[in-house]
Image (spheres, grey):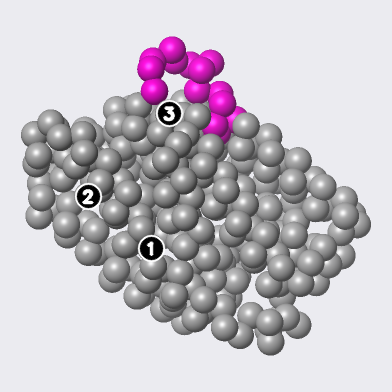
């Protein structure tokens, strides 16, 4: 398979996955639009489940190593995730301090977060990134993947009806996406990215839900403020750490999988 064919196939799969993720919800429900934290906490989101099933099946079209469905290059490389784990503990600590929602809601949030982590990592830093790597050097592939990952979060506005918040989430997605991209490149595996992605979404959502619950669920401005401030203030360390991990990516070009 030529580099151009691999890229075209990767882009085609990604576009289908994105359409399923954003626009298939109407096939299952006629409920009016809800905020993202409400959507992720009231039940398994059908379009997220469907998108996860689709992208998992589509991943078999590509070599497992290209997609990153292999073990990390070494156990030592997993130490790179330790600062992220410590940082994530702050979000979970905040949620516990404010008061977690019911165990049922926590379970729903965790399940949805896992589905999102698997789905988005396979689609973006798995299939899409390997498509760009077949055609471009490592840094152009990183930038293209991260910018597309950020831009697609604007489409959350079609699900929630809140395009302003979706734009903020897009900025947050770019910063955190660069961190996941760095973990993907440095470990050679997508599995750590899936785990961190699921934990990040779980911690952030539980913190928002706990704060809204403590407020009595009354002030909508609190919920809006948290959804805006948590991404903006919380993701800057992700971007900085991700760029630091990628500081030698260009020099390590020879170690990266080469175009077929």
Q: Position of residue 221 (x, y in %)?
A: 21, 39
Disc 1 vs disc 3: which is toward the camera? 3
- Using the rendered view, name the quadrant where residue 210 is placed: top left
Provide the secondary structure element on which disc 1 rests: loop
Q: Which residues are magenta?
A: 20-33
Q: CA distance from mark 1 to mark 3?
A: 23 Å
Vertical relation: 255 (above or below) 170:
below
> Residue 235: which numbered mark, if any?
1
Disc 2 vs disc 1: which is toward the camera? 1
- State which tag comes first along the sequence, 1 or 3: 3
> Residue 161: which numbered mark, if any?
3
Vertical relation: 59 (above or below) 20:
below
Disc 3 vs disc 2: which is toward the camera? 3
Q: Residue 224 vs residue 120: left or right?
A: left
- State which tag comes first along the sequence, 2 or 1: 2
Work out whether residue 54 or residue 35 is closer to the camera in this orientation and state it: 35
User: Is residue 15 visible in the rendered structure shown here?
Assistant: yes
Q: Position of residue 32 (x, y in %)?
A: 38, 17
Q: Residue 255 vs residue 112: left or right?
A: right
Provide the secondary structure element on which disc 2 rests: helix
Q: Which residue is mark 2?
A: 207
Crowd class of label 3 (few under 14; some 14 to 19; many from 20; radius 10 Å): some
User: Is residue 191 visible in the rendered structure shown here?
Assistant: no
């Amino acid at each position: 398979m030529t580099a151009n064919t691999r890229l075209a196939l990767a882009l085609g799969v990604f576009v289908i996955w994105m359409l399923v993720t954003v626009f298939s919800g109407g096939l299952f429900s006629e409920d009016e639009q809800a905020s993202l934290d409400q959507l992720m906490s009231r039940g398994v989101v059908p379009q997220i489940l469907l998108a996860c099933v689709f992208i998992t099946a589509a991943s078999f079209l590509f070599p497992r190593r290209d997609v990153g469905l292999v073990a990390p290059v070494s156990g030592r490389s997993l130490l790179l995730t330790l600062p992220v784990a410590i940082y994530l503990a702050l979000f979970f600590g905040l949620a516990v301090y404010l008061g977690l929602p019911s165990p049922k809601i926590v379970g729903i949030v965790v399940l949805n977060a896992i589905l999102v982590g698997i789905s988005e990592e396979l689609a973006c830093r798995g299939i899409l990134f390997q498509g760009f790597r077949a055609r471009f050097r490592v840094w152009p592939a990183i930038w293209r993947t991260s910018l597309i990952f950020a831009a697609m979060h604007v489409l959350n506005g079609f699900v929630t009806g809140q395009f302003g918040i979706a734009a903020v989430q897009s900025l947050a997605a770019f910063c955190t996406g660069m961190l996941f991209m760095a973990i993907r490149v440095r470990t050679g595996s997508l599995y750590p990215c899936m785990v961190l992605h699921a934990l990040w979404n779980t911690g952030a959502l539980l913190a928002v839900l706990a704060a809204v619950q403590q407020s009595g669920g009354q002030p909508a401005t609190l919920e809006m403020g948290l959804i805006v401030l948590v991404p903006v203030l919380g993701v800057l360390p992700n971007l900085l750490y991700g760029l630091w991990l990628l500081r030698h990516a260009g020099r390590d070009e020879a170690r990266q999988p080469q175009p077929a």
